Image (cartoon, rainbow, N blue to C red):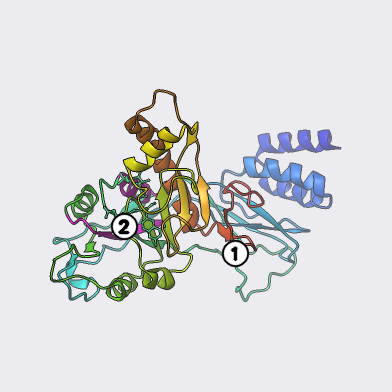
């Protein structure tokens, strides 16, 4: 039976008969196993806009950009609109300095000059539009459901104290369109650090927090919370930030602050463990493996719930600098992947409080 269906689908593919293929799929839908085979073909076959009515059990696609994913639902939705489109996104010009939130503070550097709208021309991508739970139009049997579900683009704040290479990786991913979010503001305790310089060169406002000792002016934690709220920040990303995040900010951004640490927590974390100090401690311990950890931030250094890790070898003759470079390379990839998942709302929380990242390819799997 499978062979018959397979060769029928191959023939249909060659004749590009989408409607007949849809009927075949509809027939195949009656049997779970055959349906899966036909859908695999359908997924490969589609290269034009097409509305295929899949009878029987519903498939709910989750809009995640180029890769399609299914989550099987027993809902009564009898069909799904499969739409391919090329698109070019034009973001409205970033607010000019005059339209930035009215922040009366010397501690917020607002770049001068006009901002060019960010334009990201999307390649041909297949968007799976599934019926949003709130859609009023109840689909009638056999009718195509057209209910685009869009995940809102997220607003990000990045905190740095140093060179900002992780910040740059995240910002570049946002500009090339792989990351469904924008870095709207940079926060630093060192206004002349490399990360702050990069922000200024890219038109990103820089906020000084906390102020340096002895400086007269500075933002209080509640001022910082107010400022981030005015920017409508959704998530805060610590990337080499070396100050303790105050409890006010933790409370205001519950389960919304991430940090990247250059060791496999809980090992080699906590007060005093930052930068090269971490890598020196790893080498001195004789550990054979290290790697970056990304975790949610709580009131203490490096004790928040772990979201993602990568492993790298520690070689017998490694210097701290060599190990740091190996770990940093993984950090750049890992942080971008994690923030992409965060912006696509693929982070879920297990009932015991452990955060997980739902796979982009298969929503039933976790990374
Ligand atoms: N509330 C939290 N704040 C911060 C966290 C966190 O997990 N919870 N992570 C740190 C980043 N970090 C490790 O990933 C870290 C940074 C700094 C230190 C540290 O010991 N700092 C020194 C001061 C260093 C300096 O000012 O140059 C210290 O506090 O004595 C440990 C871990 C960011 N904030
Ligand atoms: N405990 C915090 C800590 O040590 N963070 C580490 O600081 C470096 C910042 O590099 P970057 O400024 O080039 O992103 C990164 O390696 C990060 O893991």
Q: Ligand 1 near label 2 (Cβ, under 8 Å)?
A: yes
Q: Under tag 2, what secondary structure?
A: strand
Rendered-image quadrant of the N terminus: top right
Q: Is residue 82 magenta?
A: no
Q: Is residue 35 above or below residue 183?
A: above
Q: Which residues are magenta?
A: 165-191
Q: Nearer the viewer, residue 43 or 295?
A: 295
Kindly state the secondary structure of the residue where label 1 is placed. loop
The residue lying toward the viewer, choosing from 344 and 22, is 344
For residue 212, which quarter of the picture? bottom left
Q: Residue under circle 1?
A: 146
Please identify the quarter of the rendering in which residue 46 is found: top right
- The CA span between labels 2 and 1 is 40 Å
Residue 235 in picture, x, y percent from top left: 41, 63
Residue shown at 50% from the left, 49% from the top: 266
From the viewer's perspective, is the residue at label 2 or at label 1 nearer?
A: 2
The residue under the point 45% across, 44% down is 334
Report whether 148 appears left or right of 26. left
Picture coordinates of residue 253 (x, y %)? 42, 69
């Amino acid at each position: 039976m499978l062979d018959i269906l397979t060769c029928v689908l191959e023939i249909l593919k060659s004749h590009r008969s989408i409607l007949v293929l849809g009927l075949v799929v509809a027939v195949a839908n009656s049997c779970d196993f055959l349906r899966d085979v036909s859908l695999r073909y359908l997924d490969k076959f589609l290269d034009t806009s097409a509305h295929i009515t899949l009878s029987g059990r519903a498939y709910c696609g989750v809009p995640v950009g180029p890769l399609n994913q299914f989550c099987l639902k027993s809902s009564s939705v009898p069909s799904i609109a499969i739409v391919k489109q090329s698109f070019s996104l034009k973001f409205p010009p970033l607010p000019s300095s005059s339209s930035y939130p009215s922040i009366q503070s010397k501690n917020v550097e607002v770049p001068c000059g006009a901002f060019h709208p960010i334009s990201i021309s999307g390649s041909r991508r297949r968007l799976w539009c599934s019926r949003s739970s709130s859609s009023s139009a109840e689909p009638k049997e056999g009718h195509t459901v057209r209910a685009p579900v869009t995940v809102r683009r997220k607003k990000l704040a990045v905190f740095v104290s140093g060179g900002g290479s992780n910040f740059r990786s995240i910002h570049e991913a946002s500009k090339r369109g792989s990351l469904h979010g924008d870095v709207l503001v940079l926060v630093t305790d060192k206004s002349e650090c490399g990360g702050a310089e990069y922000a200024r060169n890219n038109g990103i406002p820089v906020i000084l927090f906390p102020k340096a000792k002895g400086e007269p002016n500075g933002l209080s934690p509640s001022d910082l919370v107010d400022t981030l709220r005015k920017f409508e920040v959704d998530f805060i990303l610590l990337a080499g930030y070396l100050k303790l995040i105050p409890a006010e900010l933790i409370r205001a951004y519950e389960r919304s602050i991430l940090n990247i640490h250059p060791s496999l927590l809980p090992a080699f974390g906590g007060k005093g463990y930052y930068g090269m100090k971490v890598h020196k401690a790893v080498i001195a311990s004789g550990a054979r493996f290290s790697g970056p950890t990304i975790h949610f931030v709580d009131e203490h250094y490096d004790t928040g719930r772990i979201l993602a890790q990568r492993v790298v070898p520690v070689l017998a003759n490694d210097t701290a600098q060599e190990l740091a470079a190996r770990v940093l390379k993984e950090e750049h990839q890992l942080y971008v992947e994690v923030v992409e998942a965060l912006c696509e709302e693929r982070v879920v929380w297990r009932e015991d409080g452990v955060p997980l990242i739902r796979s982009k390819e298969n929503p039933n799997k976790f990374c």
